[in-house]
Image (cartoon, grey):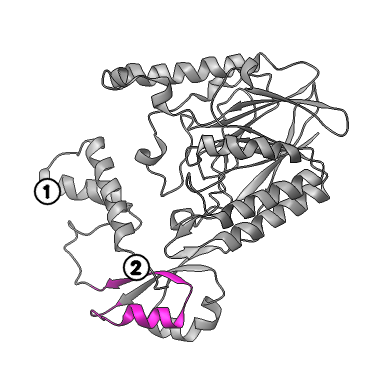
Amino acid sequence: MKIVHTSDWHAGRFWKGISRNDEHASVLENLAEFIEREKVDVLLVSGDLFDNGSPSAEAERVVFSFFKRVGKSGAQTVVIAGNHDNPHRLNAWGTLAELVDVHVVELPCARDKGGVIPLTTRGGETAMVAAIPFAPPGRIVSALELAGDDTAVKQKYAHFMQRLADNLAGGFGKDTVNLMMAHTHLDGAVFSNTERQVHLGDDWCATPQIFPTSAHYVALGHIHNPQAVSTAKAPAYYAGSLMQLDFGEISEEKSFVVIDAKAGRPARIERVPYRGALPLVEERRTLLEIERDAETLRKAGWLRVVVPLDQPDADVNQRVRKLLPNALVVRTELAHAPLPAEHAPRGGMTPAEQYRAYYQLRHKTVPADALVDAFVDLYRSQEEQSECVPSA
């Protein structure tokens, strides 16, 4: 049985004044071609199809056209809701999507309530797909409990996830291909650079040990950085996002996961890069270098351009954007007189490291971790606000 795992599409994303619908359509066309060519039996989409709960009609058209095409190919699809999706909206269109073999699970439920979906492939094999959509803490922990001891309520959330996984795994068989899906943060997973705790709900996490050894594969969504979860008891992977969604994901090669599974045997797993999206690139160039290399830079993708200057220049932003219409962010760096050695930041230091160094210099003591985390959140928030948005 051939299976493809994809996740975190965020279709309908409108970012820094641009729509990325065309890129989504191109990437999904490439993915659909792969599914058709390789005769994929099962497609797993582990949440965050859309960037928000009320996607545009164009974003829905891109997504539904993909599912229609994949359904015609003979592949069967299981979709779970992510934290960006509207579960009620997914439930509504899911009733119609079943006509093209798309099965939607919008909220966590037990195996006898639709939490496990049996699929019979065109080759006669059976897959049991256990689905854990995003579980909002408010549905699991009461408001009174949320107002009480943090440790206790977070343990209750983790315990719920364990019990749910155990319940769903009860639907697995020895003669079936057993698949589990979850849109959640697992303890120890590595975030992308712009994924903050406040957004992901870092403390509301499950342990990798909740997944049973009887699972051939665990398809994870929620974290955009593609990765295997080595501490899980079964092969577990975050597929990652469909494309680089912001400049914090510059270094990540986006890919989907291909699984070859057979009952009673370990699965074979590989990653295949997505094709069709523009890369996000940071370029540090002087104005002269930008003028010289403008033709090449215009074809490089979406740019964040850093321009070193000897003195302030009010026109630099406009000049760069005129040369490079694909420059979504333009920043300047002013040269300064060198600081005394004891004050000078070391090259390659992160904002957190620089703040720690400053705090120790100023207060002669080490800052609390919570204070450093708050500084990093504030720094990133201010960084986003200060980035210039191109005019329409």
The tag on residue 246 is none
Give yes or no for residue 312 being in the magenta stretch.
yes
Say the numbered circle drawn on residue 362: 1
Q: Position of residue 280 (x, y in %)?
A: 51, 62
- Residue 35 placed where, x, y %? 77, 47
Q: Disc 2 versus disc 1: distance between alpha carbons?
A: 32 Å
At x 35%, y 19%, the residue is 142
The image shows residue 389, relative to residue 342, as above or below, that is: below
Query: Farthest right residue?
Result: 123
Callout 1 amino acid = Arg
Q: Which residues are magenta?
A: 309-335
User: Which residue is drawn at the image coordinates 41% and 38% (left, top)?
Assistant: 200
Q: Residue 318 in the image: x percent, y percent?
A: 35, 80
**Which mark, by number, is residue 388?**
2
Q: Residue at x 84, y 27 (%)?
A: 125
The reply, left or right, for residue 153 in relation to residue 88 is left
Q: Quadrant of the C terminus?
A: bottom left
Q: Secondary structure at mark 2?
A: loop
Label 1 sits on a secondary structure element that is helix
From the image, which quarter does the N terminus lie in?
top right
Amino acid under label 2? Cys
Specify the farthest residue to the left: 363
Nearest to the eye among marks 2 and 1: give it. 2
